[in-house]
Image (cartoon, coloured by chain):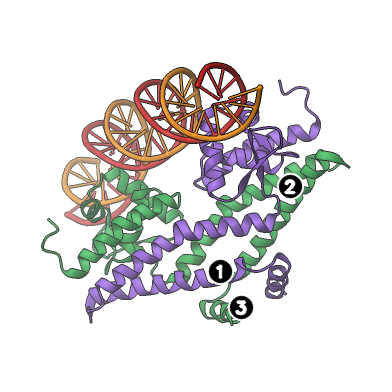
Chain colours: A purple, B green, C red, D orange
Amino acid sequence: MSQELPDWEKAREEFVSQWGSLGTQWGINRTMAMIHALLMTAPEPLCTDEVMEKLQISRGNAHTNLKDLVGWNIIRIVTKRGDRKEYFEAEKDVWKIFTTIAKERKRREIEPAIHLLRECAAKTQDETEGPGREFHQQMRDLNEFLSFAVKVGDTVISMKHTSALQWAMRLLS
Amino acid sequence: MSQELPDWEKAREEFVSQWGSLGTQWGINRTMAMIHALLMTAPEPLCTDEVMEKLQISRGNAHTNLKDLVGWNIIRIVTKRGDRKEYFEAEKDVWKIFTTIAKERKRREIEPAIHLLRECAAKTQDETEGPGREFHQQMRDLNEFLSFAVKVGDTVISMKHTSALQWAMRLLS
DNA sequence: CATTATTTTCACTGTTTACTGAATATTCAA
DNA sequence: TTGAATATTCAGTAAACAGTGAAAATAATG
């Protein structure tokens, strides 16, 4: 079935499949990563059936992962007039992809950690010396670091691509 | 068994267990994250049996994850003289933890992605227009972005904590 | 409405990953 | 050497996660 594809589509299939494997290392499930890769490289938005067909996956699987990607804000639903199907389109601008993912990861992964650290620090406020104090201090240090990192991250995320670029260039020179 | 612990140890147990759950969201297995949390908050290095006991896990599990953490360079083996057991100690300096993890993630997660993107871009060099060209450009864009991010990352990682702090402060102000 | 297209859910199955515990290998001290 | 202490491996099992497909729900059409 894939023997009559144009060259670039062969490269694309390779990309989709490999991006899927890389995804698993990133803690993202294979299908989700593949769908994302497929849509990022799609000339036009695709509907569920097209995704199912291209990736050879079931409707349920396609549906769940498409909706999860929408939840991550890295793909969006578009509709064609005179057609009641939902089509899906990925953000292609690299900087936007990056900032969106960074925002989500911050919300899902960093903020809960900060919350935990703050709690653990609070619970051990009164420790004045010994291991208890050291524990308290460790919680504070971790919390302070992550909170600061979030501030920096927020600043970067809110920058336009070109400003971020200029800022980073200055660091490198 | 945990009813006669000092207050700070209660907070610690909470921390260890919750850090374990957070770990799974980060794509790290629960046990590994728990061991890391345990060691980060341990007044003294712990041996395998102590880890097994505190976390109620099997020897094999403790062993494998301890060694994996050593492979990540975020814990290290120490020996006590007159005792042939291996003890494990976590890096406690937050900046060092961060740079070490960043280095490893770059190596394991970013670099393979860059490699793939470069390949896919190369394979589609010749596409001059249409969807093939767009695919090629997308691969280049992603590659360029990640490569640049790695450069910035490397620079930051190689900084001392205080320099990094000053640099980041300047960004925020 | 009734019909059809489409989306959503979910019980079940398959696959991958994590964990156990006992067997094996290694190391060190006597 | 030998054997006791420790570290490592690994086959088997358990748990978590991902994927299927058909049934149910929803939405659009005439």
**What residue is rendered at 45% in x and 66% in y?**
B97
Disc 1 versus disc 3: nearer the observer: 1
Residue density around tag 2, few if under 14, some if 14–19, many if 20 or more, within 10 Å? many
Determine which of the numbered discs, if any, sits on residue A81 in the image: none
**Distance of mark 2 from mark 3, alpha carbons?**
30 Å
- Which residue has dot 2 on it? B139
Badge 1 is on which residue? Answer: A154
Q: Residue at the spot x=40%, y=53% of the render? A: B23
A78 relative to A161, above or below:
above
Using the numbered discs, state the Cα–Cα distance from disc 1 to disc 3 in whole angstroms: 11 Å
In the image, are marks 1 and 3 on the same chain? no
Q: Quadrant of residue A13?
A: top right
Q: Residues within 10 Å of mark 3 (few under 14, many from 20)?
A: few
Looking at the rendered structure, the kind of residue marked 3 is Leu
Depth check: B150 or B52 in front? B150
Compared to residue A136, the image places residue D27 above or below, namely above
Percent position (x, y) of residue B136? 79, 44
Q: Chain of mark 2?
A: B
Say left or right for D9 vs B50. Answer: right
- Residue behind mark 3: B171
